[in-house]
Amino acid sequence: MSTTEGKPPSPDAATVEEMARVATAWCGMHGLVVGDRADPRSGTVPGVGLVHAPISLLPSRLSESFWEQACDLAPVFNELVDRVSLDGEFLQDSLSKTRQVDDFTSRLLDIHRKMMDTNKDENIRLGLHRSDYMLDSETNSLLQIELNTISVSFPGLCSLVTELHRTLINQYGNLLCLDAKKVPGNEASRQFAQALARACDEFNVDSAVVMMIVQPEERNMYDQYWLVKYLKESYPFMICFDTFLNYEGYEFLFLKFLISKRCSDSFCLLALLQFSVQDLLCSLKTLSEVEAEGQVLPDGTLVVDGKKVAVVYFRAGYTPNDYPSEAEWSARLLMEQSSAVKCPSISYHLVGSKKIQQELAKPNVLERFLENKEEISKLRQCFAGLWSLDEEEIVKSAIENPDLFVLKPQREGGGNNIYGLDVRDALIRLKKEGGDALSAYILMQRIFPKASLANLVRGGVCHEALTVSELGIYGAYLRNKDKVIINDKCGYLMRTKVSSSDEGGVAAGFAVLDSLYLTDK
């Protein structure tokens, strides 16, 4: 993503070490932390085994024109996901071969088919997405890596990285010749929380909560807790005024008077009274806990652990590892059968699969879902080459030139894609197996971004490396029947990794969190 062109001189080694110490201290003070893999309890006990999140010491550079292009695409992709999700037969047909060789996709499609057979409508549809891009040096084009529709991570921590980098630039700006104003603001966590809160408002059931589906062991829990924090900040002010002001007790009449006078003391009093309400706002549950504690009432209401659920927000459920038994699959079906808003619904989840991404890149397919020719053109400009493995000429080309392709399975998270000579070996093996084995994968054009030197900080140790970066633009989409309530970009995620690494997941240990420094070129 970044380039070395026009880059100011790097600070000396002593200054770099000083900045790294300042940065890691800032992380600890401001909650830019993750669980320590060395501590076995760090993924289950909050506050135990914390380390600073892996970070880039300074932001990566990107031309403002590419930044604007990526931001402009977010609402278009949001609308596209919604349109495709409504075409159940397209999803089923496009993934029909994949299901023959991928049990996980097959189980998702089974749930989707059950919803289709019962004609279940999702009147309120909420999507929290992220579209990932890299700047290809061969074509000088911003090309899409993938579109994520479930469990998009790091909105909480990435918002903090921009604050960290602005702080460092303000402190060392004269030495670095950098301007903190060129680091774009990042309100991803607040905007995601606001979208969740607004979905609750549209659901319009008293005392209903947001239920976040999490993994039993989650070292990235603090990213999730930032969302809970902002949800509690935004949502009480949407419900507490009505809740408290309609109460006829004298103490609440006094509170009503203070609020009507816009007295600052009213917020102090309100804070004292909100604790019980906040406890009801967000519930974190694993899939197995939902199966054990959940039920769907005759009217469709989802109740888990005695609480009505307005929104189910998935931060788990995107990988086969999240379904070790039938209990987890039963929970997924139970939630889908309910009237709760699912983020994502089963159909939104399927739209984010690699095979659907490849199908949408085919000629004339976008026109099936979108009418605006300008928007269609914008989408096609960012599409990298994508092919199914039943195209013999492409498979032959990939075997002959494996370094020009990436082989992608229907799996989310870092560490699943196949690169280099392994592409050739995998394709030869799959061809020998015959049948539908090839349907479990797609081929993608490999993108070659320019590399630049950067200082990366992990575990308190700073080292310089040749790096490349990947930009993710968050988007939120909320619709209630025919009314689009939210369709916008919601901040960004910047990930930087050493250029020799193929994979790019932060949680998987391949990349670090970064931010952007916008340039004219």
Image: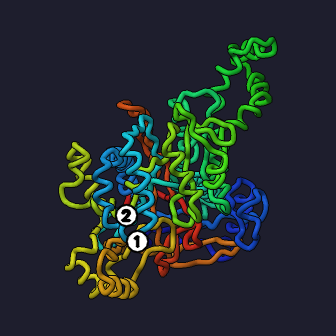
Q: Quadrant of residue 38?
A: bottom right
Instruction: Bin the neighbour count of mark 2 within 10 Å (Cα to Cα): few under 14, some 14-19, many 20 and up.
Output: many
Which image quadrant: the C terminus?
Answer: bottom left
| In this rendering, position of residue 482 left or right of residue 127 | left
How many residues crowd around disc 1 within 10 Å: few (fewer than 14), some, or many (20 or more)?
many
Q: Is residue 251 left or right of residue 461?
A: right
Question: Looking at the picture, how far across and down is residue 387, in whole percent?
Answer: 27, 70
Q: Residue at x 45, y 47 (%)?
A: 345
Question: Front-most of 240 and 504?
Answer: 240
Disc number placed over residue 409 in the picture, else none: 1
Q: 74 or 349: which is nearer to us?
A: 349
Left-right relation of 472 to 227: left
- Circle 2: residue type: Lys
471 relative to 499, above or below? above
- Which of these two is toward me, 378 or 465? 378
Tag on residue 354? 2
* Amino acid tagged 1: Pro
Q: Position of residue 286 (x, y in %)?
A: 64, 54
Separation of disc 2 and disc 1 at Cα?
A: 7 Å
Q: Is residue 447 above or below residue 197?
A: below
Regarding residue 91, the answer to whether it shows in the image is yes
Quarter of the picture holding the N terminus: bottom left
Asked if 24 appears above or below 371 in the picture, the reply is below
Residue shown at 39% from the left, 34% from the top? 484
Q: How many marks?
A: 2
Which element carries disc 1, helix, strand or loop? strand
Task: Kindly identify the residue that appears in the image at 45 percent across and 60 percent down.
Answer: 107
Decide: marks 2, 1 in contact (CB < 8 A)? yes
Q: Residue at x 43, y 70 (%)?
A: 3
Q: Secondary structure at mark 2?
A: helix
Q: Could you say which is closer to the camera, residue 482 or residue 514? A: 482
